[in-house]
Image (cartoon, rainbow, N blue to C red):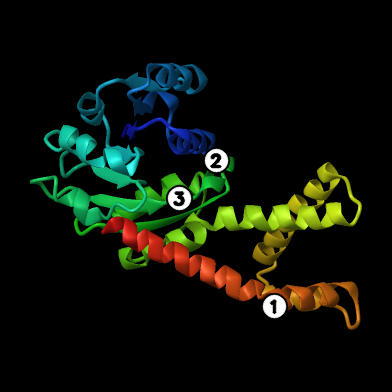
Amino acid sequence: MRKTIGFIGGGNMGEAIVKGILKSKLYKSEDIMISDIRKERLEYLKNKYQVKIFDNNPEMVKECQVVILAVKPQNAKNVLEEIKDVMTSDQLLISIMAGIPTSFIEDFFSKSIPIIRVMPNTPALALAGMSAISLGIFANDGHSQIAAQIFKAIGETVIVPETLMDAVTGLSGSGPGYVAVIIEALADGGVKMGLSRDLALKLAIQTVLGTAKLLKEANLHPAQLKDMVASPGGTTIAGLHMMELGGIRGILIGAIEAATKRSQELKE
């Protein structure tokens, strides 16, 4: 059976998903459709990925088994008004709009439309994202599996209750920003100690990347790796002492708490 998927919104995240599902051979290019208000963006996506393009959301939705809402949250109401009469209960609607609960989307439809909310993060642009998936009241395990397949094409996935989506936003959604600051600070430290900016940044990026890969592949707890590196009276324990004096743990915990609360406020 032919599988078709459509994207309302052809921005960076939508493009990342297109790239991922093509690379994983989950969908063929002729079965991928994109609708966007920017004609030049549509032409770019058509030329690069050989997908079908539309400038009309309802017309595209009629041709798709899976529809991904990839527009800015402030545009949600207008887009949902456009498609509410053409969506059917045989289709799956996946929203990657930040802060928009499934209940808000479900209220637009008179039919029982399966809706799934996904919170990907920016490393998806490098096919190394972390996506959290929550099911609406009409979505079932089969729908969940479809969503997981799609978003595994751009990284890793987890299934979470929607009540945890704000905390997910605070950690993995905002997390790339925190990690970028940590990498920049590591590089600044290297520059202070005499390294060139380019060399310091290369060392910092690869160190963070390699550490995360080792933790994942060796299934190590971070404390185990820390203890492996920190030998008695050595350089690492001296550096760790300064980090503890600076309160780095509390700062990061506080950052996640603040981002989570802000996510909750934005819904109100």
For the N terminus, the quadrant is top left
Count neighbours of disc 2 (C-alpha within 10 A) and say few if under 14, some if 14 to 19, many if 20 or more.
Answer: some
Helix, strand or loop at label 1? It is helix
In this picture, is 265 found above or below 70?
below
Pick whichever of labels 3 and 2 is earlier in the sequence. Answer: 3
Which of the marked residues, 3 or 1, is nearer the chain's N terminus? 3
The residue drawn where x is 33% and y is 39% is: 68
Which quadrant is home to the C terminus?
A: bottom left
Say what amino acid the circle numbered 1 marks. Ala
Question: Residue, x 16% and y 36% (percent of image)?
Answer: 81
Q: Which residue is mark 2?
A: 125
Residue at the image point whose x is 16% and y is 44% from the top: 89
Q: Quadrant of residue 87?
A: top left
Amino acid type shown at disc 2: Leu
State the residue position of label 3: 120
User: Mark 3–mark 1 contact, CB under 8 Å?
Assistant: no
The type of residue carrying mark 3 is Pro
**Which residue, as the protein is rendered here, is positioned at the far bottom?**
232
Dot 3, how many residues are within 10 Å of its Cα: few (below 14), some (14-19), or many (20+)? many
The answer to which quarter of the image holds residue 92 is: top left
Residue 18 against residue 215 in the figure, above or below: above
The kind of secondary structure element at disc 3 is loop
Point out residue 200 in the picture as x, y percentages from the top left corner.
83, 49
Could you tell whether 234 is left or right of 28 in the image? right
Q: In this view of the protein, which residue sits in the foreground, 66 or 54?
A: 54
Q: CA distance from mark 3 to mark 2?
A: 10 Å
Q: Which residue is mark 1?
A: 223
Q: Are marks 3 and 2 in contact (CB under 8 Å)?
A: no
Task: Kindly indicate the quadrant of the structure image that contains residue 51.
Answer: top left
